[in-house]
Amino acid sequence: MPAARFVGVDGTEVLLDVPAGQTLRQAALDNLVPGIIGECGGFATCGTCHVVVDERFRPLLPAPSEDEEIVLEGLLTPVTATSRLACQIAMTDELDGITVHVPESQG
Amino acid sequence: MGGSLPRSVDDLPLLPDLVAPQAWSADLVAASDGLFERGVRVLRDGEGGLLVIGDAVMRALAQDPAVGGTPVEFLTGRAGDRVRRATGAAPPSGAAAFDAFLRNQVFTMNAALHVAVRRVVARHLVPRAVLGMAGHAERVLVGVLDEVTRVGGVVDLERDVAGPYVTRFWTDQLGVPAGAALRVQQLVHEMNRMFLFAPTLEDRARVLAATEEYLELVGRTVAMAWERGDNALLGHLARGLDGIDLPGAPPDLGALVAANFFDGFHTVAVAVANAARCLLADAPAAERVRRAPSLVAAAFTEGARLTAPLMLTTRMALGDVEHAGLRIPAGTPITMAWIAANRDPEAYDEPGGYRLDRPPRLGTTFGGGARICPGRGATRMLGEVALRALTATSVQVRLESPQPGWVPGSAIRRHPAIPVVVRRVAAA
Ligand code: HEM
Ligand code: FES
């Protein structure tokens, strides 16, 4: 099963097996990864599942939708070129080993 | 656990069998606390629909795309039925304005139209946009507090403080002239009767008349402000609306704003007043916030959890829905008692307690799923600005007795009055 690594601001790492098709938001919530809230349930409307994806994996992700872009641009927490919403990242075999950084706060 | 659910909705308990209608109507929060004690999380509402009170099941259903917005025809039909049941008479005619008001609300839209219109409203209420409005909110509130402290004496926290504060804030933001703000506040107060469980003919007539005037006033003044071309928010909203080419979209900018910012004028004022009263009624908590203003966010969230003003709304099963084995047929109205789930003992320790140190956990105060309230960030900002100002060392707010109860028989959680005395305190 492909795996994903969540890295907190203090450097703590959580490594999870994520079934293909499951979103990183769901995997994080199921495993109580600190810092992922996911208030809207995965519909790219709340911005509380923001993660910064490791540069190496960016080309493997589909481009963000218009809704995801609107939400990311509206966040108060610093957003980088590799910021994404974890609810919009569905696991694939290609993404095995993906590393995402969880920001200090959400929203 | 809240017990397993039956497979058929017919096997769910029936609300009127467990709670007397008067008890539900008098205080649905107390009634649902009693239902939790009996292990109940979902019921039949006795009007042909479901009533959801449990946290986990509510979140799951709120996030199910098949649990959608409630069509206008259902809402107006039910409103008419309620008048008939309460009065034995036919509801008054002339509801065209009210119908338009509901039709232009994102609440009642579904599918592509919902996504498109919601996006237009929501994209200008994202956290970054809201932060840019905070300075304006602070200035408006200073003006309101200046007025009430100059006059002195007992004032009402909702009508005289929170109401003018949020109404002036939004009327300014939306280009509605200052002179119209008081009238807008009065009209949304009248329209509040639409949330009554058993409206009289007079209530219904007053709602219809106020809605007609509100739509005309807000619609006209917003259109004029947009034509002047100096209001950025209206410019953005108008361009967004222009880009929607779908049947059923709001016909013009005024209609879009009047229908969808109604909660901005009305519900936010109730949210701010309720949360402020919660905090002021707990002297040690108020003192903690006064000493550590960074606690205002927790204070507002906790107050809103306990006193969520929009206690319930009804969604509709757009297709067959299945949750934990329970099959809900398409067309079933599903009433979400958002405030009840905020107190589900399976989700909260000591659910009725006002605690500033609760672990950050999301309530259902603002709904959930793809239809979660797009105004929640603005509401939190307005609430936090208010709590900060009302607990500042330069201000003293004293709650006067008698302590108010809750307005019965309404889907809105509000006090009939919150008498307070507000004083400026000279710096030590
Ligand atoms: C700036 C102020 C506000 C605006 C502009 C606003 C607007 C809206 C809109 C347009 C929706 C429909 C969303 C959709 O169906 O996709 C909505 C949903 C909702 N709002 Fe607000 N609202 C505001 C304040 C509030 C306040 C103060 C509360 C109560 C604390 C509240 C509670 C809710 C709830 C519970 C829902 C979900 C309803 C449902 O799913 O049936 N809103 N809001
Ligand atoms: S869960 Fe709300 S945006 Fe991802």
Image: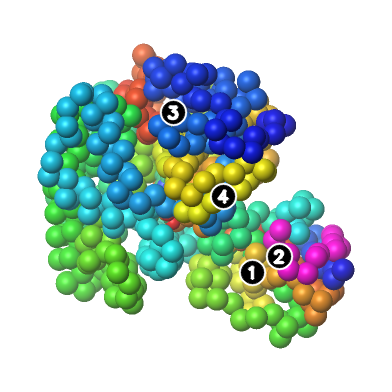
Residue B189's x, y, as percent? 24, 37
Residue of label 4: B321
**Camera-nearest label, 4 or 1:** 4
Dot 4 amino acid type: Val
Mark 4 lies on a secondary structure that is strand
Occupied quadrant, residue B183:
top left
The vertical placement of B39 against B173, above or below, is: above
**Camera-nearest label, 3 or 2:** 3
Going by the image, does A68 lie left or right of B209? right
Residue of label 1: A88
Mark 1, Cα crowd under 10 Å, few <14 / some 14-19 / many 20+, is: many
Give the residue displayed 17% in from the left and 72% down from the top.
Answer: B227
The vertical placement of A51 against B313, above or below, is: below
Q: Determine if the C-beta at disc 4 is less than 8 A from ligand 1.
A: no
Mark 2, Cα crowd under 10 Å, few <14 / some 14-19 / many 20+, is: some
| The N terminus of chain A: image quadrant | bottom right
Q: Is residue B315 magenta?
A: no
Give the residue displayed 71% in from the left and 85% down from the top.
Answer: A59
* Ligand 2 shown in quarter: bottom right
Residue of label 3: B46
Mark 2 lies on a secondary structure that is loop
Q: CA distance from mark 3 to mark 4?
A: 20 Å
Q: CA distance from mark 3 to mark 1?
A: 39 Å
Please give the range of residues in magenta: A12-26
Dot 1 amino acid type: Gln
Mark 3, Cα crowd under 10 Å, few <14 / some 14-19 / many 20+, is: some
